[in-house]
Image: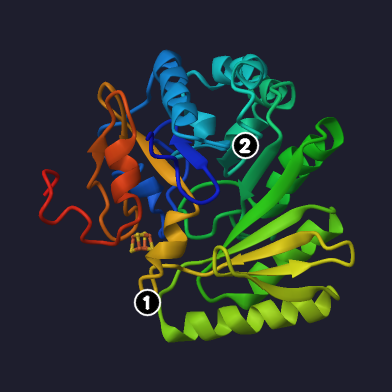
Amino acid sequence: MTPTIPGRGDLRISLTSACNLRCSYCHNEGQEFPWAKEKLSPSLNNIHKMIILGVKHGAKQVKFTGGDPGVYPHIIKLLGCIKDWKDEFSGITRWGIATNGVPFINPKKFDALVSSGLDNISIGIDSISDFEYSKPSSPMGISGDSLIRNFVIPLKRNWDGEIKFDTVFIGNKIATSEVVDKARELSLYASVIEVYQSNDVRSSFLELIDETAERHHLEKRLYEFLNEWYLYDKNNNPIIKFYQDHCVGLDCGSCRKIHLRVVPNGNGFAAVPCFVKARTKTIPITDNLDEAIAHNSMGPEWYKGTKYE
Ligand code: SF4
């Protein structure tokens, strides 16, 4: 029996370890930090093979990440493949990308994104201010206000896919609330991702959920399948999602159902079973995902006693 990708069947493919920003809390999908010397970027052919393998193991959705996919050398060509891949892989129901957005201000990349056939985009943004970077923990970037004016609003005007703000919460309720409010103002979805640094962050995170539900007249409900709090509108749409840090208390069982993460390695891809607590401990992928699925999100010590030790 061919093992299937657990939970949502989400295959999260890192296109590159490189990024145009340097966020202090970067997990880089479990790879070396983007500012590491070696930058890895797979060929389009290897990405196609990885999707074939994912489909063989029951993948239902694909998300392209990085580093930042916008700096992947072949991003325009890759975006040009999506429509054909959607026909070829009819079992994949959602095709998405996660980016900080800045690289897609480039007109050629913007046009390729808009005409790509992707159906959802997650834009990483932690501030909408004109006085600080959209990712304030990065020593470089553009202001949040500029990102919204030069990328988000043109994208909303020219593309009818699902746009979501992904905002990282490390304790600043004001900044995060401003990002969520801006998403609602633009009728976009939003996710608040907790990066646990202390009990104070956790308690503020829980307060933020209640305050946001009250401010936007939304219903707070626990999505038990992933043990996450979602805020629903009156049409029962989960328009704001709160992803608590599952590493707290080692809620690895929920983590296992969220994604199967693969990152580039020299000649193809490798799986990253525990992308936060066991960074760079990976499983090279050959012609099946059996080992990758077996060890996926089995905790920070998954490799102990295995050939990957
Ligand atoms: S598997 Fe690793 S990344 Fe996932 S929740 Fe457990 S400790 Fe965190």
What residue is drawn where x is 55% and y is 48%?
8
Q: Secondary structure at mark 2?
A: strand
Picture coordinates of residue 136, whole percent (x, y): 54, 59
Q: Quadrant of ligand 1?
A: bottom left
Q: Which residue is mark 1?
A: 249
Picture coordinates of residue 26, whole percent (x, y): 41, 54
Mark 1 neighbour class, 10 Å CA radius: few under 14, some 14 to 19, many 20 or more: few
Picture coordinates of residue 4, whole percent (x, y): 44, 40
What residue is drawn where x is 62% and y is 36%?
96
Picture coordinates of residue 122, whole percent (x, y): 63, 46
In the rendering, which numbered label is found on residue 96?
Answer: 2
Residue situated in front as seen by the camera: 22 or 159: 159
Asked if ligand 1 lies within 8 A of label 1, the reply is no
In this view, the mark in front (2 or 1): 1
**N-term-proximal mark, 2 vs 1:** 2
Mark 2–mark 1 Cα distance, whole angstroms, equals 30 Å
What residue is drawn where x is 34% and y is 34%?
289
**Is 31 drawn above or below residue 277 in the view shown?**
above
Q: Amino acid at mark 1?
A: Gly
Q: Amino acid at mark 2?
A: Gly
Residue situated in front as seen by the camera: 270 or 4: 4
Residue found farthest to the front: 1
Residue found farthest to the right: 234
Mark yes or no: residue 35 visible: no
What residue is drawn where x is 39% and y is 18%?
46
Q: Secondary structure at mark 1?
A: loop
